[in-house]
Image (cartoon, grey):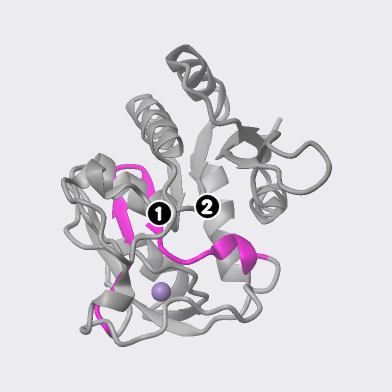
Amino acid sequence: MRPIIGVSGIIEIKQGPILPGHKISYTSNDYIEAVDLAGGAPCILPLTKSEDVIASLAQSIDGLILTGGADVSPLLYGEEPKRGLGRIHPERDNFDIALFRAVHELGKPVLAICRGLQIVNVAFGGSLYQDLNAEDAFYMKHVELSEPHTGTHTVRFTKDSYLYSVFGEKTLTNSLHHQAIKEPGSGIKVTGQTEDGIIEAFEADNIVGIQWHPEHMAKHDPKMLQLFEDFVKRSVKGK
Ligand code: MN
């Protein structure tokens, strides 16, 4: 039996002529395919307000992928919204943080990708840059809309980190974010950065946080797939 890997879901409100206003629960299929390729059994966890459902989901899975998506509400880290803030989704913030806490408290591994990395940082008391374009110090392009499996910027890793053991000193990653970690939360060890100083990866107790999107690269780069394989191995069945 494969470990069950929960993949946090998103709600979208349908536009257009068929069922406008209808809510759809989904996630990017690249997470699903990457988990499958890595030997896990992917399972989409639908966004819910129910604490009982969240507790049951956390019990049922063996590992959690917190997925990418909309901006995190700055109210969660004590800031008012600035002009460059993108669309927020407070219900999803609440779901992701509650789900993360429930899974983490059970000692199960978490792979936090893009917005997921930001959510974990905020859950641990850290803060975010609301919009990198408003920060002159960060001169690199972090919203790159070429083919999403293309590595477009360099991330360098600190020695003695898990990510260094996978990639060595550096790797090329895609980049699809305009927010990033400002103050790291408690217990978060920064292990990957770009030349302009953006935090692109962290490691914490049974958590790997990644600012780029390895799920789009997993079919093209064996080391990106290895991130999922290692994560599935850490997700011990039925623990
Ligand atoms: Mn980046």
> In terms of image quadrants, where is residue 156?
bottom left
| Residue drawn 26% across the image and 49% down it | 74
Left or right position of 166 against 202: right
Residue designated by label 1? 71
Q: Tell me the element at label 1.
A: loop
Query: As drawn, which residue projects farthest toward the front?
Result: 17
> In terms of image quadrants, where is residue 129?
bottom left
Using a 10 Å C-alpha cutoff, classify the residue at mark 2 as few (fewer than 14 neighbours), some (14 to 19) or many (20 or more).
Answer: few
| Residue drawn 31% across the image and 64% down it | 180
Identify which residue, 9 or 133, lies in the foreground: 133
| Residue drawn 32% across the image and 47% down it | 73
| Residue 146 versus residue 217 in the image, above or below | below
Residue designated by label 2? 230
Left or right position of 86 against 191: right
> Given the image, on which type of amino acid does mark 2 rest?
Asp
Q: Is residue 3 visible?
A: no
In the image, residue 123 lies at what x, y percent? 27, 40
Identify which residue, 216 or 168, lies in the foreground: 216
Ligand 1 within 8 Å of the CB at mark 1: no
